[in-house]
Image (cartoon, rainbow, N blue to C red):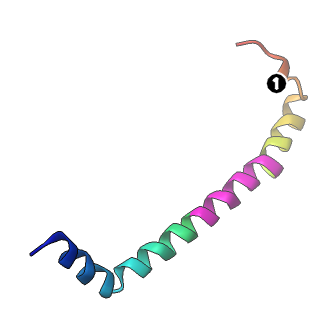
Amino acid sequence: MSIIQEFKEFAIKGNMMDLAIGVIIGGAFGKIVDSLVKDIIMPLITVITGGGVDNLIF
């Protein structure tokens, strides 16, 4: 069985659609988590630590 034939069978079974939906949902979830950390969690940490975290030299 050739690779092309196997790919056609894979795509016809609906796995391709499931994979595409998973990638889209994963990307959206990543953006939600990134926004949550950037807009909510990091400002809270900055307030708790007094805002001097950016001035530290490591």
Residue linked to disc 1: 53
Instruction: Identify the image quadrant of residue 57.
Output: top right
Instruction: Tell me residue 20's x, y (percent).
Output: 47, 74
**Residue 47 is covered by the magenta coloring:** no
**Image position of 20 with respect to 45: above or below:** below
Q: State the residue in front, 9 or 29.
A: 9
Is 46 left or right of 25, judged from the image as shown? right
Quadrant where the C terminus lies? top right
Instruction: Identify the image quadrant of residue 8.
Output: bottom left
- Label 1: state its secondary structure: helix
Is 36 left or right of 20, judged from the image as shown? right
Q: Check disc 1 and give the amino acid type.
A: Val
Residue extending farthest top: 57
Instruction: Tell me residue 3's x, y (percent).
Output: 18, 70
Instruction: Identify the image quadrant of residue 36.
Output: bottom right
Quadrant where the N terminus lies? bottom left
Q: State the residue in front, 17 or 49.
A: 17
Q: What main secondary structure does the magenta stretch of the protein show?
A: helix
Q: Residue at x 90, y 28 (%)?
A: 50
Q: State the residue in front, 37 or 1.
A: 1
Is 8 left or right of 23, judged from the image as shown? left
**Residue 33 is covered by the magenta coloring:** yes
Is 40 left or right of 33, judged from the image as shown? right
Q: Residue at x 42, y 79 (%)?
A: 18
- Residue segment shown in magenta: 27-39
Instruction: Tell me residue 33's x, y (percent).
Output: 67, 56
How many marks can you see?
Answer: 1
Q: Residue at x 32, y 81 (%)?
A: 11
